[in-house]
Amino acid sequence: PPHHRESKILRAMQTTPIPSSLLAPLVPSVHQAPGIRHFLALTTLGLVLASGGNAARADETTNASDDPPVQTVPRDGRMGSDRFVRGESTRLKGGHAVAWAILSRSGKIEEVGVTISLGVFRTEHEPGDGPLDAIASLEFPRVVREATYFNHCQVHWNPHGHASPPSQPERYAVPHFDVHFYSVPEAVVWAIPALPPPLPDVPADLLPAGWQQAGPSEPEMGRHSSPDSIADGPFAADMIAGFLPSGRTMHFIEPMFTPEFLARAEDFTMPVPRPQRFGRTMLYPETFSAEYDSKLNAYHFVFRQFGIVE
């Protein structure tokens, strides 16, 4: 079957080390992680294209000590210093998307990210088949799902915008993209109901400092909370936090952007919402950045600086 064939192709790439003679010419500096992300993301996206554009999941690894050989990242001048682990990938109208992580040689999670072609953000899309018409739903590698906040990500195209904070009711009523980084499996997202107010307040220790109370529950998504600091005026890019209907779990982080903002093809950062308490012990990031890769003509959306939270 086609899916079986694609899985074999991806497994072969996962278990075959890339010789340094091939890798070195493609990475301009051994100290630049974006160079290796470009090469490895391009390799994965090329496989997706070659397989006919269908989504495919690579073999996953659980830790640094017992998984098969994978591509290596020459970050400090020594082959094998860091390792790139793929999650799911897919072909979209206008380009491709791939979920991934970078682990240190000792198995420490250094980066978790998604790479999406810029062409995807320059294209209008038909409703997808994911929760609430998501055009893509990509699971992160197993090591990410088991150790960190992140389970999978979804990409949404909103041609007519969507609901906005009560303080700025028209802010998000413009065409834009949402990238939801979920902490729960897709099956849980599918089951989230639409619920109008009144709903329970998010407890103070579960609501990030400086963020508004969550609103109504959107079907197959949840409740949204915006930072108090969002500026008045036209929307270009904002970071949102999401909660389950009970208000007791922050189950997604959501950077949102207009196509015009992303078309600038520039790097930018956004704040990561951080409650005082999460309700479970895991790794959680301090920073989020969007890094434009001119060679790949794509954005790397990257979380870094992971620490233990409870």
Image (tube, rainbow, N blue to C red):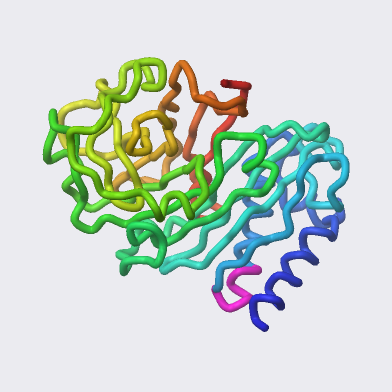
Of residue 292 and residue 271, the one placed in the foreground of this image is 271
- Residue drawn at 70 percent across, 76 percent down: 4
Q: Quadrant of the N terminus?
A: bottom right
Q: Position of residue 86 (x, y in %)?
A: 67, 53
Q: Does residue 295 show up magenta in the picture?
A: no
In this rendering, is residue 227 above or below 300? Answer: above
- Residue drawn at 66 percent across, 35 percent down: 147
Numbered range of the magenta stretch = 47-53
Q: Does residue 52 show up magenta in the picture?
A: yes
For the image, the number of numbered tags is 0
Of residue 199 and residue 287, the one placed in the foreground of this image is 199
Q: Position of residue 156 (x, y in %)?
A: 36, 55
Q: Position of residue 205 (x, y in %)?
A: 40, 16
Quick check: can you spot residue 85?
A: yes
- Residue drawn at 72 percent across, 66 percent down: 10
Q: Quadrant of the C terminus?
A: top right
- Residue drawn at 63 percent across, 75 percent down: 50
Q: Position of residue 170 (x, y in %)?
A: 12, 40
Quick check: can you spot residue 259?
A: no
Of residue 265 and residue 229, the one placed in the foreground of this image is 229
Query: As drawn, is 204 to the left or to the right of 38?
Result: left
Query: As drawn, is 98 to the left or to the right of 205?
Result: right
Query: As drawn, is 23 to the left or to the right of 254?
Result: right
In this rendering, is residue 53 above or below 280? Answer: below
Q: Which residue in the rendered view is the most extreme toward the bottom?
A: 1
Of residue 161 and residue 223, the one placed in the foreground of this image is 223
